[in-house]
Amino acid sequence: MVDNCDSAGNVDADGKDTACTSCDRPASLHQSMGGGKAADILLWKQRHVSFGIVVVATVFWLLIEHSGLPLLTTCSDVLLVLVVLLFLRANFAAFRKKQLQTLPQLVLSEEFVDNVAASFRAKINNALLVAHDITLGNDFKLFFRMVICLWLLSVLGSYLSFFTFAYIGTIISITVPALYSKYDKHVDRCCGMIRQQFRKHYRVMDESVFSRLPGSLSKDKHQ
């Protein structure tokens, strides 16, 4: 995968042009996403599984948002229907003396559980470190960014329910990687231009506002 970086250069804090980050990205997006079954699903290499996730997520969202039923009731009803159908299917096959296809055994490996636990541990520790810095008032920039993020989440929460937000996140996570793998050159070019403009505006804001905030002053004193 070769990226065009001529028009997607970045500008650092000193105003100098730097190479775009896409040039440093691994040659294969599939490898950068882990290279396993999860990457195959997100990149639609297993189309039936990816399409099934979209369909299940859509049906579940419609049941939750438009049926008016509580979450526990909906989940219980869906599981009840599945259990009854599978039980009747097995008994009907036994009555007709037909052998059913063996279902795959669903087992979580110890390695998978350890990786998930380590990932959550790192993210939780990072969140606790950020909260510690904010409560001590050491970094006003971090406090300002956190306030903006929480305010944006509050605004989104006033328009979207949690399940709608989760549904949108699921659809984005299952579609954006596949679209990016197909149109990566165009996306890298546009993102590079947007990031360049954003860095220019942020540098102006940093020089005129952020550099005069208490967090910056305290850091200068320590230095």
Image: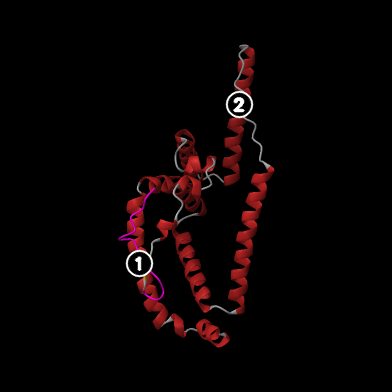
Circle 2 sits in a helix, a strand or a loop, which is it?
helix
Mark 1 residue type: Gln
Q: Local crowd at mark 1 within 10 Å, few (<14), some, or many (≥20)?
A: many
Quick check: 95 left or right of 12? right
Quick check: 44 left or right of 119? left
How far across and how far down the image is residue 176, in percent? Answer: 42, 48
Mark pair 1, 2: CA separation: 56 Å
User: Which numbered dot is residue 196?
Assistant: 1
Q: Is residue 14 above or below residue 128?
A: below
How far across and how far down the image is residue 212, in percent? Answer: 46, 85
How far across and how far down the image is residue 130, in percent? Answer: 59, 70
Please tell me whether residue 9 belongs to the stretch shown in magenta: yes
How far across and how far down the image is residue 102, in percent? Answer: 62, 24
Q: Which residues lie in the magenta part? A: 1-15
Residue lying furthest left: 7
Mark 2 residue type: Leu
Task: Give the number of callouts.
Answer: 2
